[in-house]
Image (cartoon, rainbow, N blue to C red):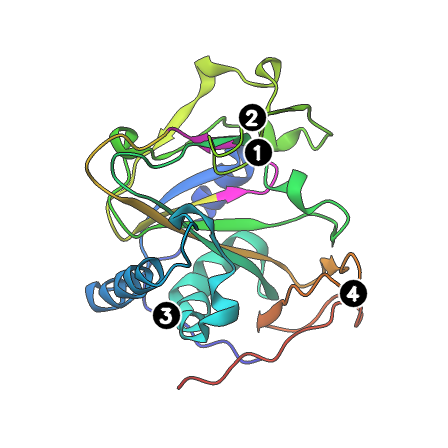
Amino acid sequence: MAAMKSSQPIPTPEQAEAYRREGYLRFGQLFNEEELGELSRTIDYLIETLPKGKRPEHLDVPHFDHPCLMKFLTHPAVLDAVEALIGPDITLWSSHFISKPGGDGLPVSWHTDADYWKGRLQPIEVVTVWLAVDRSNRENGCMRVIPGTHHERKERRYRDLPEGSNVFGTTLEENEIDEAKVVDIELEAGECSFHDAWLIHGSLPNHSPRRRCGYTMRYMPSSVVFAPLGPRDTHKVFLVRGKDLSGGKTIYTEIPKPV
């Protein structure tokens, strides 16, 4: 697949090294004002048309039903930035809007993304682009990370949470968390950060009057094999740049054409 390049800045070698060392990286704008406005209108529409009882924190894999989002997920500025971190052969693994409404936005418990993907990815090597659709700060529940924890690729211990109290139903046990090392990832609207699948992260509830919406765009080297868990696992992955390095073991879905 030929790669169209962007004129936007990409992570420098020093930033890429910091990402590998710390497990996360704050970055700048990926989209221009017009593109960000289009993305924001899309999430507004998705929230307005939510089924009764479904919360806006749970808009997982929206690009499956709304292929217009592929414009953003395959944007040259995004893929150039990802390429600087994982190389030129890139699979789109997933995406997720986590939109916390003002006043009662749910927290995201401490977790690692890798713990949710075990058995499906071999190995688990995923970078998440966390795009701030809205301004995201501590007041409205920005993402928080514990730097360096991605180096510990191990089974972690979780405990259950009361139903409906959190975006997820479990959280890491307290002895897995070093609060003294927590870093708040505050971003202006349109800015992004990157984080490793094994990094411990989460976020506080949103009790402010402002919405906090982030779009997580998840990518992995095409050498990673996606193995569905069975016939009910209908997840789709897309080869968005470069060539397939899985030896044909990953089955890709064709990228939908723009409408």
The residue wearing badge 1 is: 169
Residue 201 is inside the magenta segment = yes
**10 Å crowding of disc 2: few (<14), some (14-19), many (20+):** few
> Which is more foreground, mark 1 or mark 3?
1
Q: Quadrant of the C terminus?
A: bottom left
Name which quarter of the figure residue 143 lies in: top left
For the question of whether residue 241 can be seen, the reply is no
| Mark positioned earlier in the residue sequence (1 or 3) | 3
* SS at circle 4: loop
How far, Cα to Cα, is label 2 from label 4? 30 Å
Mark 3 or mark 2: name the one nearer the start of the chain.
3
Location of residue 198 in the rendering, given as x and y in whole percent from the top left corner: 61, 37
> Looking at the image, which is closer to me, 63 or 131?
63
Residue 231, image quadrant = bottom right
Whichever of callouts 4 and 3 sits on the residue coming sooner in the sequence is 3
| Residue 201 x, y percent position in the rendering | 50, 32
**Amino acid marked by disc 4:** Pro
Q: Position of residue 195 (x, y in %)?
A: 50, 42
Q: Which residues are magenta?
A: 195-204
- Look at mark 3 in the image and give the residue it sits on: 6
Q: CA distance from mark 3 to mark 2?
A: 43 Å
Q: Residue drawn 39% across and 67% down?
A: 72
Instruction: Report, in whole angstroms, how far the alpha carbon at label 4 lies from the one at label 1.
Output: 25 Å
Judged from the image, the secondary structure of the residue bearing numbered disc 3 is loop
- Does residue 174 show up? yes
Q: Which residue is mark 4?
A: 231
Q: Which mark is residue 161?
A: 2
Which residue appears at 21% of the width and 40% of the height? 210
Q: Nearer the viewer, residue 191 or 66?
A: 66
